[in-house]
Amino acid sequence: MRKILSSCYYEEKMEYITVGEVLKAQGIAGEIKVRSLSDSAERFAKLRVVYVENKPYKILNLRIDREYVYLRLQGVENRTVAETLRGKFLQIDRVHAVDLNESEYFIADLIGCELIADDCPLGAITDILQNGGGADVINVRAPSGKELRFPFLNRIVKEVDVERKRFVVYRKLLDEVCVYDD
C-alpha cells in the first residue's frame, strides 16, 4: 500500500522535514503544545533536537497525550518565550527522519513530480493536502495553468519514481475521480 508521510523542504544545503506545528504555550514553565504532522506522535520520543526557523532547540522533556506532543525546549524558559513559537513549524534534519518503506513517500519528494497518464504528461504536482479525513489530495498544475486534483488512491497509482520525478497513474481511473479547476 502506497502512503504519503509528512512534508519536507530544502534550505541552505540542509534538508528539513516538518514534523509538527506549535499550537500554543502550555502552562507557565515554557512548555509548548505541538500538533504532530508525523504518522505517529511517538516518533517524537526518538528526537533530541528540533529546528524552528533554522534555529536548533534541544528537547529537554517530552510527553504525549493522544495526537498532541508537549515539549520543553532548551532556551524556552517561560510562557512568554513559548508564545513566540505559536504557529511555527518544528523540523528535523532529514538524516533523523524515519526510514521509509518502499511504497511510502515524503510530500517534498512528490512535489515537482510530473503527473503522467497513458504516456501523456498532464502537469507537475504542486501540493499535497492532508486533511486527515481519508485520502490525501494531490494538486497538479497543467502547462495551460489549469489545476486538477485527485485523491491519492492506490488503485489509481501505477508507478511512483521520485528519483526520476515521475508519478504515473491509470488515465481511466484518474478521470473517474479527478476534479478540474479553471
Image (cartoon, rainbow, N blue to C red):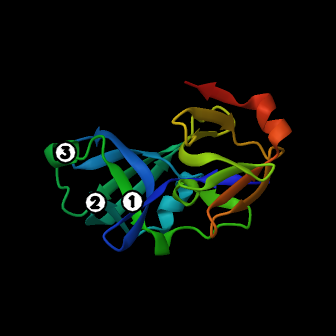
Q: Quadrant of the N terminus?
A: bottom right
Observer-nearest of 125 and 52: 125
Question: Which residue is at 27% across, 41% downward?
Answer: 86
Q: Which mark is residue 91?
A: 1
Q: Which residue is mark 3?
A: 84
Mark 2 or mark 3: whose residue is earlier in sequence: 2
Question: Which residue is at 81% across, 29% downward?
Answer: 176
Within 10 Å of disc 3 (Cα), the crowding (few <14, some 14-19, many 20+) is few
Mark 1 or mark 3: whose residue is earlier in sequence: 3
Q: Where is residue 60, by image quadrant?
A: bottom left
SS of the residue under disc 3: loop
SS of the residue under disc 1: strand
Give the mark toward the camera: 2 or 3.
Answer: 3
Q: Which residue is mark 2?
A: 73
The amino acid on which the numbered mark 1 sits, given as a three-letter code, is Gln
Counting from the top left corner in percent of width and height, residue 109 is at 56, 60
38 vs 18, left or right, is right
Task: Give above or below for 28 relative to 14.
Answer: above
The amino acid on which the numbered mark 2 sits, given as a three-letter code, is Leu
Counting from the top left corner in percent of width and height, residue 62 is at 40, 57
